[in-house]
Image (cartoon, rainbow, N blue to C red):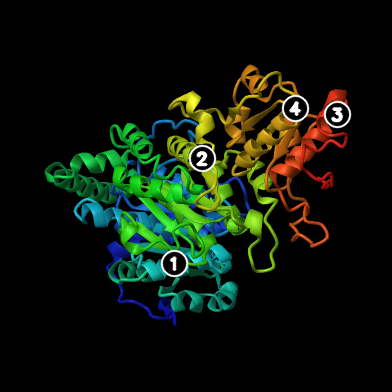
Amino acid sequence: MPEDLASTPLPAASPAAANMPQRLATAIRHAISTHEPDRRYAPHAQVMADFCAVLWSRFLRFDPASPEWPDRDRVVVSSPRYRVLPRIMAELSGQAPLPPRVGDPARARHDRQACGPSGQGLGAAIGMALAEQNLAARFGRSLVNHRIWGLGCWTELSTGVALESAALAGQMGLDRVTLVVGLWLNEREAVDAILPRYSASGWSVRKVNAASPEQIAAAITSSQRTHKPCLIACIAAPETDPPPPFADDPGLWAGAARRGASARRSWLRRLLKDRQKAEFERMARNQRPAFWQPDWQRSWREHGSAIARVSPTFAAQRGLETLHELLPELTCLRSRRGMLADLPANRRGGSEIDLSCGTQVHGMAALLNGIAMHDGLLAFGTSTIIAVDRMRPALRYAAMTDQQVIYLLTDDDLLRGDGAGGGQPVEQLASLRAMPNVAVFRPADHRETMECMELALRRTSGPSLLTLESTPALATSAAPEREQHGLTNLCARGGYVLAEAEGTRQVTLVATGHEAILALAARKLLRDAGVAAAVVSLPCWELFAVQKMTYRAAVLGTAPRIGIEAASGFGWERWLGTDGLFVGIDGFGAPSAPDRPDSTADITPERICRDALRLVRPQSDALVETAGGNGAPPGMASTDASV
C-alpha cells in the first residue's frame, strides 16, 4: 500500500534551510500568477510550487548554461494544468536561451511538453525511462545516469494508457522514472482508489503534503534510492493565510546553477576519456551512421533473389535483422500478435532492446513516443492493423509533435478477419490516411517493402506506418515488371506505373499492397480480351499527393480508372475521378456463400477484369464482339459481383 508521508512529520530543519524552499516557492507562485493566462489552471499550478522549488534547487540534474546537455534529467509535463511550469523554472533558474527549432521554435528540449490526449505524457515519460535504461546498458552509467520526472494530473492516473504504461514500467524494471501528481485534499478519496493499482504493478507509491518541503525532499530521496518506478501524490489543502510578500532575489538559484555546472564538467571529463565518445555523440545528435543507406541497399539487393517470392512481412523481418546490425540505436517494441511475436529469440538482432509488450499496445505506442522524444534511439513498433484503434491517441500525438516513430503492422485481417468476431478492419487505412503528418505505406512485394522501409527511415518529421501482408511464400512478385526501372526507388514518389499498357491505354488499374499483384494478373486477362490496361502501384498516398501535377497526370493517365484495395473505398475518389470504379470491401467483410462464390469480400483478377470490361464497354463496340458478346473474357462466367 502507499506510504503516507503526509502524516509522518520529518525532523525539523534549521531556520535557514527551511526558509530557502519557501522563498523559492514564493517566487514560483508569483511567476505563475504573472505567466498563466488561464485562471482555471493557475490554482492547480500553485499546488506544485513547493515541489518544483525542492526538485529544481536540490535534486534536478541540469545545467542552466547548457539546456541541451545529453545527460540532463528530463521533465515531462503531461497535464495542461502545469504547462506554465517549465517556462517559469527555465526563466527563474537562468537557463540560457535555446536556438529556434524548425517547425516549433517555442519548444524547449530541457523540459518536454506532452499536453496531448489525457495520459499520453505519463506514458511518454515512461518511454523516456526505457530509452535511458537502454542507453545506459550500451554506454554505461558514467555517460548515461539521469532520471525522468513526469508532472501530471491525478485524473490521468486512471486512463488506460497510463495504467498500461505503468504495468510495462513495472515489468521492465524502469526505476529511473518518477511521476508526480497534484491534487486537493477533497480529491484524496478518489486517488486512494487508484494508487493501489500502481502498487500492484510494481511501483513505489508515496503521498506527501504539497506544502511541506521536508516531506517532498524525503519522497524524492526515497525515489532515487528504490529500485522501482515511483509515484508521488502531492496533496494540497486550501490556503487560508495570505501569501507571503514577494521579493525578487536573483541569487536564489545560484546554488543549483553551481551544482549543475559542476556535474556537467565532471561528465564532460568522463566523456573525453570514454572509448565510445564518437558513437555516443552521434546517437545523442540523432545522426545515422555514415554509409548506412548504401549498406542497407546493398544488403537487401544481395539477398533479393532469396526473398523475391516471400511475403512483405517476411521481407520486413529480414530488413529489421539487417537494420539491427546497421543501426545500433534501433529499439523495437512488439505486441503479442505483432510481426515478431513468433520469431525465435536467437534470430532477434539486438535482443536486449527488442521488448515484448503483450497485448498492451496502447501503452506500447505511448512508450514509443517517449523513446523518440528522449533522443538517441530510433523507435520501431510491431503490431496488427486491427490494433490501430488502441494506438490512435499516441499515434496522433506523435504526428502533432513530429516524432519519428515507425510502425510495422501486419494486415492479414484485411482479408481474413481477426478470427474473434470483430470483422475485417476495412476502415483503418482510410482513417490513418486522414490523419495529418502520418505517412501510410502499403507495399506490394519484397522490393516495395524494402523501399518503403528506407523511406520511413529517411522521414524524420512524423510517424510512418507500413501495413504488411503475409501472403503465401510462393505468391507472385511484381519484381519482374520492375526490371526495366533498374535500382531506382520508385516508391519515393508515392506511386508509379508498374506495368504500362500494350498500346493506347483503355483502362488504368490503380492498386496498393498485394492487390497490385492481382491487378497484374487482371491485366493479362484484359489483354486476352483485347483491352490494353496499365497497372499503377500506389504504395504511399501522402508522397504521391505532393508530387507535381504533371507527374501524377502522367502516372494515372486519362483512361478510366479502377481502384483496387482490400479495404473501404473512402477517399479513393481523389485518384479515380468521377467516372472511376472501386473494387474493395464494403461493410466489415462477409464470407463467401455457396450460391454466390464472388462476394464483395473477394478481390480476384476475374472480378477486376469483369469490372474493367463493364467500365470500358461503352467506349468500344468492338469490345463486345471480342469478349463474346457478354463483356466477359473467353472462358469466364458473366456473373457480376456488386462493387
In the image, which disc is placed on residue 168?
Answer: 1
Q: Mark 2 points at which residue?
A: 462
Return the residue nearer the eye: 302 or 22.
302
Disc 2 from disc 1: Cα separation:
24 Å
N-terminal-most mark, 3 or 2 = 2
N-terminal-most mark, 3 or 1 = 1
Amino acid type, residue under disc 4 in the picture: Gly
Disc 2 from disc 4: Cα separation:
45 Å
Disc 3 from disc 1: Cα separation:
66 Å
Q: Mark 4 points at which residue?
A: 530
N-terminal-most mark, 4 or 3 = 4
**Residue 18, quarter of the rendered image:** bottom left
Residue 108, position in %: x, y? Answer: 43, 41
Q: Do the residues labelled 3 and 2 touch (CB within 8 Å)?
A: no
Residue 69 seen in render: no
Residue 194 seen in render: yes
Q: Local crowd at mark 1 within 10 Å, few (<14), some, or many (≥20)? A: many
Amino acid type, residue under disc 1 in the picture: Leu
In what element is the residue under mark 3?
Answer: helix
Return the residue nearer the eye: 212 or 76.
76
N-terminal-most mark, 2 or 1 = 1
Q: Which residue lies furthest to the left in this view?
A: 273
Left or right: 634, with 79 as reference point: right
Return the residue nearer the eye: 210 or 106.
106
The residue that appears at 79% across and 61% down in the rendered structure is 593
Q: Mark 3 points at which residue?
A: 625
